[in-house]
Amino acid sequence: MGKLLYPRLAWQNIKGDRRFFAPYFLALLGNVAAFYIMTALAVDPGMSQLHGAMYVQSFCFMGMFIAAVFSAVFLLYVNGFLMKQRKKALGLYNILGMGKSHIAAVLFFETLFVGGAGIVCGLLTGLLFHKLVTLALYKLLRFAVPFGFAISWDAMARTAILFGVLIGLTLLSNLNKVRVSKPIELLYGSQVGEREPRTKWFMTLLGILTLGAGYYIALRTTNGMEAIAFYFVAVFLVIIGTYCLFTAVSIFVLKALRANKRFYYKTSHFIGVSGMLYRMKQNAVGLANICILSTMVMVMVSGTLSLYLGTQDIVNRQAPSDLTVLVRYDPDEAEPFDPAAMLRLQEGFIQDQGYSVSEDLIYSSFTFTVGRLPDGSYTTENDLVTLGTAITTIQVLTQDAYAAATGVSLGLEAGEVAFGGEEDVLTIHWGTLEGAGSFGRSDLTVAQHLEESLSADAAVSDTSTLVVADTAAHYDRVVCCGGDGTLNETLGGLLSLPQEERPVLGYIPAGTTNDFSRNINLPRSTQELARVACGGVPRSIDVGDLGGRQFLYIAAFGLFTDVSYSTPQASKNLLGHLAYVLQGAGRLVNFPSYQVKVTTDQGLEVEGEFIYGMVSNTVSIGGMVNLPRDLVCLDDGQFEALLIRTPKTAKDWQSILTALTSQKLPEDGSVVGFTCSQAHFTSPKPLAWTVDGEFGGDYTDLTISNRSRVLTIACGN
């Protein structure tokens, strides 16, 4: 035989049976084009420039895997249809004297021609439609898409290799069928009816398990993070389950119906069950393909349209305002946030751009992350949050803040909450930062269920809004656990209530220096601190007002005053009080001097250059300076003020150090001390103030006033 005989025979077969080869060719072309487009988008260099590129690329690669699996099954199905129609021609070759090796050579060239043409034409079609898909992305996403129009050689190579392997597998399958078949079987193979299929127990069980698992994941997944993680897992399980359902489970069900003689031996049932049983083997894969394809098309079209048409609604829900400023801070670590100052800054910026502000809104909330436990409760324990089946961020607001943000008044009573979940009782287990377990729980009665989250943070995890009644006035005592900065924040909240409604404040110091705890004789052990906080003797004390900002025990400027809030939190945790000493030691080399004038309500006037100044109501300053308790009274309506002039000589330094250690004012005036109820400070340059160890703002003109006995706090013996 000539060397070109087999290629010629193969080409003639393709032309003669084109009505059978055409569906196979078109199926191959479509799969190649679709896979190339998906791969080209996934490996495009511009993908890394997208917001959330890591998640987008992960989705694309998972989609490529699903598409590869589907392409393999679909091509095997189409190839089976083609081979059944060609058995007569192959059998005729065998009867006319061609050996099976010769038939295998013809099949090889047929597969080479059709497969090669399908891959090449598919890649060309993919190149064309890749451009159209890229243009569609420009339109759909409504912003510049960083994808180029260059040919993706990487995607072409991946696609060619994948489908080359798949076509090779179909060729091996075809050669094996020819090898084990007899000539007569090949000749009449297309006319042979279907044999009764056997019950495939393994595939039946696999189909039930995978389909059930896929739908279980789909139905039980309720938060966004889980949906992202398990979406393609559910899709893969459902695809496998669907194929097993049609090819094995359906046979199992039909045979079970046939075994039921009461049902089976009826005219309509007998014909229907018998016909389906004998036809199901060949049609099962086709029905499964149709089911999966139609479902994918509906999901894709409906999902794309929903996202596209609902984009503006999503934007309005996630960002109801044109400009949202989200500020996170820890009272013990960062500078206190001034909402009014931020609002003025933003309004000034907007006006500079030629726009005006029609409406503004400010509200505060507290957020923390919890893990949802199987019993429906939540926990803040680190280990369980990491391993929990669902991670949720809870955003806590007072109902006044919620009303300010939404215009909706909830009317919650004391002890009631409104929550963006289905629970009637919200249970939260509180865990320690070290992950040593839970130290308590809260059971909150949910009076109202909120439909939407108020969060402006576009986080991946779900956010549930928790609105609590402004219940401070309904309790006898509020306990604060933290450092001086946290205590200052709690003070601000309590003083916002009318004085007759303010509860007693209990304090458990957990900061670095805890100056204020020395004022109220707090014990050292945790158990005793908790006992005093919940049952200590109430005592009314004075509170300071610095330009509208409240403070408990000290307002200061100058040398070392920024040490408490500028020292890194990691150093505080590691070194404790020594961290402040080390941070402050660096300031001794080059300390600033401030020109300040002070006028008090008692007519005293002091002016000059100072390195330090303070107005206090405390016996401890920075954990290092202790004032006599008989000179400091927390409820007398008076501040103790101290000013240290800028030293010029070594003698001045000696005088200052002697005054601080002996607690007696020197005659040379290097240290000035006095008491007052109100003091007015002016300086030519902005002066940075610290209140209760936190940054209090910069001022050139400032009045500090004493608010006598406005706070009641639990004290030790």
Image: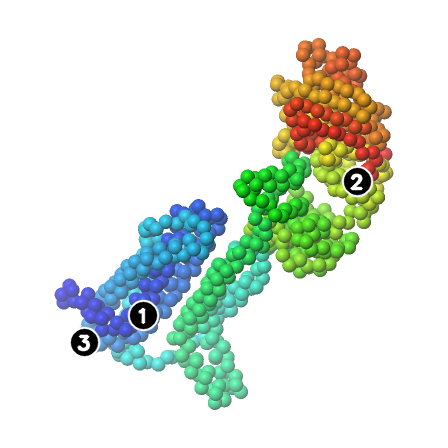
- Residue at x 60%, y 41% (from the top left corner): 347
Give the amino acid at mark 2: Gly
Q: Which mark is residue 96?
A: 3
Q: Position of residue 511 (x, y in %)?
A: 70, 34
Q: Residue furthest left?
A: 2
- Residue located 74% across and 39% down the image: 492
Question: Residue 387's x, y, as percent?
Answer: 59, 51
- Tag on residue 506? 2
Decide: few, some or many residues near mark 2? Use Cα within 10 Å; few <14, some 14-19, many ≥20.
many
How many numbered circles does the render carry? Answer: 3
Q: Quadrant of residue 580?
A: top right
State whether residue 294 appears in this view: yes
Q: Are marks 2 and 3 in contact (CB under 8 Å)?
A: no
Considering depth in this image, is 460 or 313 the residue closer to the camera?
A: 313
Tell me the tag on residue 23. Answer: 1
**Residue at (65, 45) in percent of width and height:** 362
Quick check: 567 above or below 457? above
